[in-house]
Amino acid sequence: MPARSDGATTRDRILDAFETLLVDGGSRVATLDAVAAQAEVSKGGLLYHFPSKDAMVEAMLARLQERGRTDVEKMRSAPEGPVAFYLNTSVDTGSDFDRGLIAAARVAQESDARARETLAELRNGWFEVLAEHYGDNALARTVQLIGDGLYFDDTTGLAHERSLEHVRDVLSRIEAI
Amino acid sequence: MPARSDGATTRDRILDAFETLLVDGGSRVATLDAVAAQAEVSKGGLLYHFPSKDAMVEAMLARLQERGRTDVEKMRSAPEGPVAFYLNTSVDTGSDFDRGLIAAARVAQESDARARETLAELRNGWFEVLAEHYGDNALARTVQLIGDGLYFDDTTGLAHERSLEHVRDVLSRIEAI
DNA sequence: GTCTATAGGTCGATAGAC
DNA sequence: GTCTATCGACCTATAGAC
């Protein structure tokens, strides 16, 4: 039982803090000390919930996987259609899910196989919905790559203002064929 | 003057080692000790050439910028056309230039402003050539995003075998309009 | 469940021999 | 130009009080 009365459990606050630090500064900055400070727990308190840094990574990925299943459901039943939903959420919306995704990508780049597998599984879910929608694997794959590009630019600080607008323009031309 | 008779100077061997470690394991792994070992120099020897780790980053980015100018020239005059050249080189070809690009992206993610600026400048060069070629900013931007997506997938270990083939298919449909 | 204190190791950087 | 030796700061993880 958590000692606080605010919404999140200590466990979730710690994972939130870990993700935030990974997103903002990479894993070099996301030390146990820094995570504890950000989550407003002592280092000892942190290590009660996650006995090692590795266990913390594992828990973060498990939570992301869970949230990913919800996201695919939302994408499938989005009123604006799955493509618009997918592209819109490819630019960072600041959601908890986005933050978790970026954090996982940071970890994956340091050759962490579990993080890579989690991301691959999420991407397969999105691709399936896109491929069902278009009935065209080539177009589905291309849209997914555009989403990856939007996402990469966004997380590297290279995003261009009008990217989304340009993409919508080009996609409307393709869909008009 | 270098003490060795092989092609690369000690300085270049150190930068190569730094990039390789950044690409393979991220900046947490790319320590001065590790870079020195990979470059087969002592840490003291390394710090003779680059008085600080920061100076090493700076030199790496300067070298990348120089190589980027050459790349844009090659793209502009490529016999297969700038688009094919751009997309083909967006999947990691294993070249020294690619390695440097990926290394710079790793550093940029840790909120290094210089690395971000270097990457932004390189990307502006590519975009200019694409926009000139198409005479259509929306399409040029979309192709650039596809390239970024290919690149992101590749460097995160999420690449799909047939991505490039699928993209070529879709682009040929657009260009046929 | 959460804390402090600290062990044990690694980091970037300096000093000085050759 | 390249080396070894070493410093202080910081990292992950453990031990034990409350």
Image (cartoon, coloured by chain):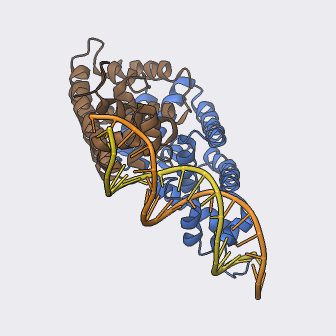
Chain colours: A brown, B blue, C orange, D yellow
Q: If the image is split into quadrants, where does the N terminus of chain B sit?
A: bottom right
- Whether residue B130 sits left or right of residue A18 in the image: it is right
Q: Nearer the viewer, residue A35 or A74?
A: A35
Q: Is residue B71 visible?
A: yes
Residue B161 appearing in the image:
no
Quarter residue A8 falls in: top left
Quadrant hosting residue B34: bottom right
Taking A80 as reference, is A177 above or below it?
below
How far across and down, in percent of the image, does residue C7 sit?
42, 63
Instruction: Please say if A98 is above or below B13.
Output: above
Height in image: A160 above or below B21?
above
Nearer the observer, A138 or D4: D4
Is residue A117 found left or right of B11 in the rendered image?
Answer: left
Rendered position, A72 above or below B159: above
Q: Position of residue A129 (x, y in %)?
A: 23, 28
Front residue of this view, candidates A87 and A44: A44
Counting every numbered tag in the picture gives 0
Q: Position of residue A102 (x, y in %)?
A: 41, 36
Q: Quadrant of the C terminus of chain B?
A: top left
Name the spot of residue A56 as percent of width and height, x first.
Answer: 32, 44
Q: Residue at x 46, y 18 (%)?
A: A169
Q: Residue at x 24, y 39 (%)?
A: A62
Residue in the image at 69% along x and 82% along y: B5
